[in-house]
Amino acid sequence: MTGRILRIELRRSAALSIGLLSLVTGTVLLLTSTQFFVGRWMQLAVFSRSMLMVSLPFALAGGAWLGQRDARYRVNELFASTVRPRWQRVVPTASALAVAVATAYVLVFLIAAGWVVPTAGYFPASAIVVAGVGVPALVAAGWLGMAAGRAVPRVVTAPILAVVGFVVVGLVPDFVTMAHTDASFTRVRPEPSALLLVPTFNGLDDFQTIATRVSLLQTLWLVSLAATGLLLLGAVRRRAIAFAVLPAVLGGAVAVPLLPVGGTRGAAVVDPVAIELVCDDDGPQVCVARAHAALLPDVVGPARQALGMMAAKLPNAPVRAVQSRQITYWGGLGVSTAPTRHADDTIVFDAPAIDPAGRADLSDGYFLPSLLEAAWQQDCGDQPEPDEESLARTIATAWLSGQPPIPQRWWEPADIERAQSAYRALVSLPQAEQRDRMAAARAAAMDCRSDGLLAILAEKKP
């Protein structure tokens, strides 16, 4: 009987419409942003979670609209006069809404997966766990919305819940994060662990994953919240309403002390498999991280071209190119780590941008100069870099390419003149002296000394 009622609810109630609208909205949002996750399963999972800032308010509003159905058709008193318990009447409707929003979320993930499968070189099982947390989150939002719609059957209830939901899941995490940073956007203290009760995630690096413990604790909290929503929906007396709040309170009491502080950055951990190197040895070795394995065919050509240009000019030139496996500064955990210096025979480059098809985006020609610039870079940890070192590195890169330095947008006119003058002075020297000076500059850079590069700026035009 209950199964037949559930099928009727799915066919005839607003639950199906809510699910279809969620499916269309989620698909449009994901497929207009494929460059953020294409080729990377974990990024797809995190992006699906970030889209909860749109789908959760929608589930809240849809649940409120569905919860007002009895009042809208003025059958509250009729149903209240029957001997059948209220929970028997609300469970099929609530189940229909849960099935609709959960199915829409899963279908959006599967549709987007079509853009990931052809170019993904690594599938972390934890991506399914991270994405799966969105299911109880949407069910909890839908059931809480239904309870609110039943309690306050007004036209404005649904839009107000949508706004409140967006503020809670979309804006509150940013407000809390900003409150814990100073004017220079440096984090002064970690965000409270309660921030992770909000299921949205933003800003995960390609080499990171969310700790499984965090996902399980979030699931525990969200299941407890969903139970509270369902109990509130079926509650009639005050005692039942007070009892309905108990699961959410207990779930929060268990989860909050066990969740890490620091928000998303505190929940993130480095995935050791994602940072494993995948190499092409058909020539000078070129390696990328496993998380970016699909980029290797696009990177090999420019990397070997850069190595050839270095070999033509530099004594003891590097012979291999390896992608950096350092976490980006915005994805860091705020903990100082020891520098991981690389050998002199290796250049370490940053991964190129990824286009919507999952390939390396080399369209504007920036990648080859960045590879040449990597010849003068070393991981020196938190050691401060003189302001002029970047200018000197640009001149050294121009010397490798045999072309005058290209002025950057942020350069002052004095910087442009200084760079051009230093470059002319450098190339006016005999070839042997140029090679010796630049070899000494690179040796100093590999030893985390800036004097060699800064000496380039001291050259005077003859």
Image (cartoon, rainbow, N blue to C red):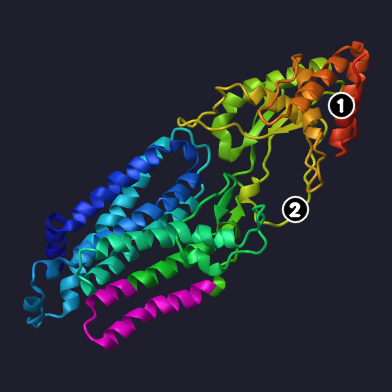
| Magenta region | 228-256
Query: Please, which residue is most extreme toward the front here?
Result: 413
| Circle on res. 337 | 2
> Mostly what secondary structure, the magenta segment?
helix
Residue 184, percent across and down? 67, 52
Where residue 444 sits, quadrant-wise, is top right
Where does the C terminus fall, quadrant-wise?
top right
Q: Is residue 185 left or right of residue 77?
A: right
Is 253 magenta? The answer is: yes
Calculate the distance from the C-alpha at mark 2 to the C-alpha at mark 1: 32 Å
Residue at point 90% right, 28% down? 455
Residue at point 64% right, 45% down? 328
Q: Is residue 208 left or right of residue 413?
A: left
Q: Amino acid at mark 2?
A: Thr
Q: Amino acid at mark 1?
A: Leu
Q: Is residue 307 left or right of residue 79?
A: right
Residue at point 48% right, 67% down? 217
Q: Would residue 363 be seen by someone viewing this image from the given angle?
A: yes
Dot placed on the residue nearer the N-terminal end, 2 or 1: 2
Residue 267, percent across and down? 57, 60
Residue 312, percent across and down? 80, 15
Neighbour class for label 2 at 10 Å: few (<14), some, many (≥20)? few
Q: Which residue is mark 1?
A: 457
Is 459 magenta? The answer is: no
Q: Would residue 95 be seen by someone viewing this image from the given angle?
A: no
